[in-house]
Image: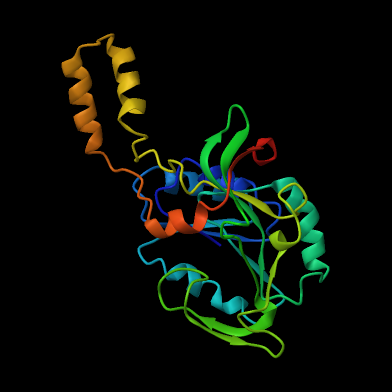
Amino acid sequence: MVLVRNEDVFVERAVRNVVEFCDRIHAFDHVSTDATWPILRSLADGYDNVDAQRTYHAGDSHRALEPYAGTATWVFGIDGDELYDPARLADFRGRLLGGEFAHAFKVASNVLNCVEVDSERKTATGYLSPPSRSITKLYNFAAIDSWVGDGSERLHGGTITFRPGYDESSVDNISERLSWEETPLRCLHACFVRRSSAEAEGPEGWARPILEETGMHDRRVVGAAKRKLRRRPQPRVSAWKREKYRRGDLVTVDASPFF
């Protein structure tokens, strides 16, 4: 289940990386104003297992999942800034469907919360979970009889009716026993990186191409460009996100498997 809004920088890669792992992908665009919706439509045209629709109500994404409750289905929640390792997923799919994780209601795993993703150099820099919080959302719907949402979005809130032997604590966090290099399920979480073409990267990053294009280096031009760019929508980073996702040491990893 993909629910996105204004995430056209990474969303195509996010979907392509899981398209072989998932039998069916339900992609919901929550009234994006950038190129996210055209990208999702193109993916739906290119893959038989991708459905895309546009919605004004994020809760529609959870209501689409409710019929899967009580069935032998694993539901994978994907955001437009979450890039999974497709080669690792290919092996993990067999283990998942083979019943290795049937004891769990939720599977969590290793994440790198990125402050930089360099797709040309194939590197990513950020904070690993653990010690940061894992954001992987992989749920065993065979463990529940129902999950009635509260209208917010997929796999958040609502009321869950568990089957015997399962509850909210039935979580298998792979990252507690395997490192980033070892894990079968790992994700680049571009939560601190520009995710939409509608967002400014910062005054310096935008003023420079303006000057190069015009060939002008007048301070008045620079000042005017910066003032204009400060009025552009900027990525918002909450204090909660910084506290949960920026724990431990800053590390750089090889990101080539994700691209």
Task: Give the x, y percent position of residue 123.
Answer: 61, 34
Viewer-closest of 161 and 42: 161
Question: For the image shown, how many numbered marks are present on the structure?
Answer: 0
* Colour theme: rainbow
125 over 191 or under it: above or below: above
Residue 145 as seen in the image, left or right of residue 165: left
Residue at 37% across, 43% down: 34
Res. 73 in view: yes
Residue lying at the far front in this picture: please name it. 249
Residue lying at the far top in this picture: please name it. 215
Residue 38 found in image quarter: top left
Task: Give the x, y percent position of residue 196.
Answer: 41, 42
Task: Give the x, y percent position of residue 17.
Answer: 64, 47
Residue at 36% across, 45% down: 235
Q: Quadrant of the N terminus?
A: bottom right
1 over 112 or under it: above or below: below
17 over 232 or under it: above or below: below
Res. 28 in view: no
Viewer-closest of 197 and 189: 189
Residue 244 as seen in the image, left or right of residue 15: left
Residue at 43% across, 41% down: 194
35 over 177 or under it: above or below: above
Residue 75 as seen in the image, left or right of residue 225: right
Q: Quadrant of the C terminus?
A: top right
Viewer-closest of 246 and 184: 246
